[in-house]
Amino acid sequence: MSKAPPPKPTDAELEILNVLWQHGPATVRAINDHLSQRRQAEVGYTTTLKILQLMLEKGLVRRDDADRSHVYRAAVREQETQGLLLDKFVDATFGGSALKLVMQALGSRQTSADELAQIRRLLNDIEIQNSTSNPDDDERA
């Protein structure tokens, strides 16, 4: 029996997860300080603590309470969480069409030559991966 994926994090929870993914395990105070720096405004310590407690209940973070200061660490992987959020966004916003997402992203803002080169390399890698992972497709054609 496979375990259910963790719930979709709220914006505030995602902000805390980003701190943990970038800086690793941290105390509430350290997380709160990072949040205050990012927002360029003071974030309430008790607000950060309460969000972390809710995240612990949801299974989004783990807490090491061996020391006096509890240390929190992300319990979900960054790439998996991004994939989950992106899948839900693409489904809800673009009817599940990756093409519509890419067309909107590339058509609505200036894309640098370096970004385009990276996109081309990614597309080439995906084509290679698809052609090597589905050798039966060639036989059916």
Image (cartoon, grey):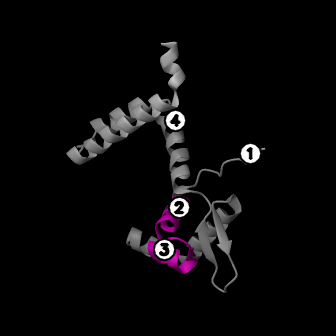
Residue 92, numbered circle: 4
Q: CA distance from mark 3 to mark 4?
A: 31 Å
8 to the left or right of 42: right
20 to the left or right of 68: left
Contact? badges 3 and 4 (CB < 8 Å)? no
Dot 4 or dot 1, earlier in sequence: 1
Magenta-span inclusion, residue 122: no
Q: Which residues are magenta?
A: 13-34
Q: Which residue is mark 3?
A: 43
Task: Identify which amino acid the numbered label 3 is placed on.
Answer: Val
Residue sitting at x 64%, y 79%: 70
- The image position of residue 126, as x and y in percent, is 42, 36
Dot 2 or dot 1, earlier in sequence: 1
Residue 2, numbered circle: 1
Secondary structure of the residue carrying tag 3 is loop
Task: Identify which amino acid the numbered label 4 is placed on.
Answer: Ala
Dot 3 or dot 2, earlier in sequence: 2
Secondary structure of the residue carrying tag 4 is helix
- The image position of residue 137, as x and y in percent, is 51, 20
Dot 1 or dot 3, earlier in sequence: 1
Residue lying farthest top?
A: 141
Select label 2 or label 1 by which is in front: 1
Magenta-span inclusion, residue 21: yes
Residue lying farthest bottom?
A: 68
Task: Identify which amino acid the numbered label 2 is placed on.
Answer: Ala
The kind of secondary structure the magenta stretch mainly shows is helix
Select label 4 or label 1 by which is in front: 1
Residue 12, numbered circle: 2
